[in-house]
């Protein structure tokens, strides 16, 4: 009889009938929402009657810790059939709920039990991006030429501003006072703490896809349609020429996900045959070219998705062959979480407390891995 692998001890999994394109934890870490490619949602309760810490045993002789396997089946997912044409733009919201924007211009809130209700009174212009900031309770969404901002859940009373270009994605800074709006060939930075005011327009001719903020709120990393990613100082206002910053190129495939590790002060990107990482300090020295932070081990399969741990210098990596591991940023060691055999990993997300990792794949495999306290030192 084969010994149980790590996933069988720490993980819960479900099979969905469609590819999973995103995984989102609620703001209170009580629920994970898996988004299907068809616009459906599936909710997994984080409440676990058999968490790993309850199955942990410490040998009196050797002091070695072991975890017994589960004795009961996991709770089923709460399925929500598609209520709009995909894609669904989902974000954690207030009171353990989620908020979703749809292409038909409507906004819905979704409870952890699967109840959803429309909170916009009428159909508005097409929504192309939506994001909520739990700390400030601000919600931003955008369409082809309008940016909307709601405060304290007042979706119906949102403030609006005109956009000079269409919006592809949105990202709040850590404080929630700044908002990055990604356009086809630029990124605009908006001050949103009091009024909605544009404070910088940064040229990015290689085509930004999505933006990720550094903890200092002075740098933004943007993945690019033409390959690689670009680091741009937020203070670099557009003067009609190329923005200051640095482009990291040479990736064999598109950078599908990019994230900052505040603990390691590094940016991490997918799209290579290993986890790609650079320190923030090195990236600001544009004359340096060989300054990558070697993380994990190189292999023969592309890293499709990455997610930085919220509190430790760790990164989760998902591969095109379904493999998932966790690596220490700047070290070669890797902890195998999920062996290959599933579809390509489309979604990776850490809970806000860093104790759980949600996984979604193209073959409909959905999973949550729960780590015992103090497993990562």
Image (cartoon, helix red, strand yellow):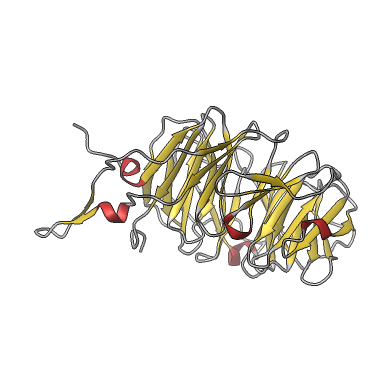
Residue 254, picture quadrant: top right
> Quarter of the image containing the N terminus?
top left
Residue placed furthest toward the bottom = 194
Q: Nearer the viewer, residue 92 or 254?
A: 92
Residue placed furthest toward the left = 61
- The picture places residue 105, in percent across and down from the top left corner, at 81, 43
Q: Is residue 171 left or right of residue 345?
A: right
- The picture places residue 210, in percent across and down from the top left corner, at 70, 49
Q: Is residue 169 above or below residue 71?
A: below
Q: Nearer the viewer, residue 141 or 118?
A: 118
- Residue plotted at (75% across, 61% down): 179
Q: Is residue 229 above or below residue 80?
A: below
Using the rendered image of the protein, determine whether residue 84 is visible from the camera's viewpoint.
yes
Q: Is residue 53 above or below residue 197?
A: above
Q: Is residue 151 above or below residue 55?
A: below
- The picture places residue 212, in percent across and down from the top left corner, at 65, 56
Image mark count: 0
- Residue plotted at (74% across, 66% down): 178
- Residue plotted at (44% across, 53% down): 356
> Quarter of the image containing the C terminus?
bottom left
- The picture places residue 56, in percent across and down from the top left corner, at 25, 54
Q: Is residue 259 left or right of residue 325?
A: right
Using the rendered image of the protein, determine whether residue 202 is visible from the camera's viewpoint.
no
């Amino acid at each position: 009889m084969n010994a149980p692998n790590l996933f069988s001890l720490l993980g819960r999994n479900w099979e969905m009938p469609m590819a999973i394109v995103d995984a989102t934890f609620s703001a209170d870490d009580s629920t994970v929402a898996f988004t299907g490619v068809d616009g459906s949602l599936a909710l997994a309760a984080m409440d676990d009657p058999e968490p790993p810490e309850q199955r942990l045993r410490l040998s009196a002789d050797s002091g070695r810790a072991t975890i017994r396997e589960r004795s009961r089946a996991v709770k089923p997912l709460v399925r929500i059939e598609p209520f709009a044409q995909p894609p669904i733009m989902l974000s954690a919201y207030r009171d353990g709920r989620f908020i979703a924007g749809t292409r038909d211009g409507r906004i819905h809130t979704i409870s952890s039990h699967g109840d959803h209700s429309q909170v916009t009174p009428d159909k508005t212009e097409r929504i192309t991006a939506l994001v909520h900031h739990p700390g400030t309770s601000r919600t931003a969404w955008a369409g082809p030429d309008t940016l909307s901002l709601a405060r304290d859940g007042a979706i119906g009373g949102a403030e609006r501003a005109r956009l000079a270009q269409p919006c592809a994605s949105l990202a709040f800074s850590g404080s929630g006072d700044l908002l990055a709006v990604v356009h086809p060939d630029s990124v605009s930075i908006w001050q949103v703490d009091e009024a909605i005011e544009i404070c910088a327009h940064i040229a990015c001719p290689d085509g930004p896809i999505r933006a990720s903020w550094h903890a200092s709120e002075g740098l933004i990393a943007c993945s690019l349609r033409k390959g690689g990613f670009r680091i741009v100082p937020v203070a670099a206002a557009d003067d009609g020429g190329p923005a200051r910053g640095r482009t990291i190129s040479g990736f064999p495939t598109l950078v599908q996900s990019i994230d900052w590790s505040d603990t390691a002060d590094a940016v991490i990107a997918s799209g290579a045959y290993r986890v790609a990482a650079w320190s923030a300090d090195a990236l600001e020295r544009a004359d340096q070219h060989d300054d990558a932070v070697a993380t994990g081990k190189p292999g023969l399969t592309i890293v499709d998705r990455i997610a930085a741990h919220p509190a430790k210098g760790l990164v989760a990596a998902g591969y095109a062959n379904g493999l998932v591991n966790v690596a220490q940023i700047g070290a070669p060691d890797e902890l195998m979480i999920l062996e290959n055999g599933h579809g390509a990993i489309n979604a990776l997300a850490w809970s806000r407390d860093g104790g759980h990792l949600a996984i979604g794949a193209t073959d409909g495999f959905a999973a949550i891995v729960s780590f015992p306290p103090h497993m990562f030192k």
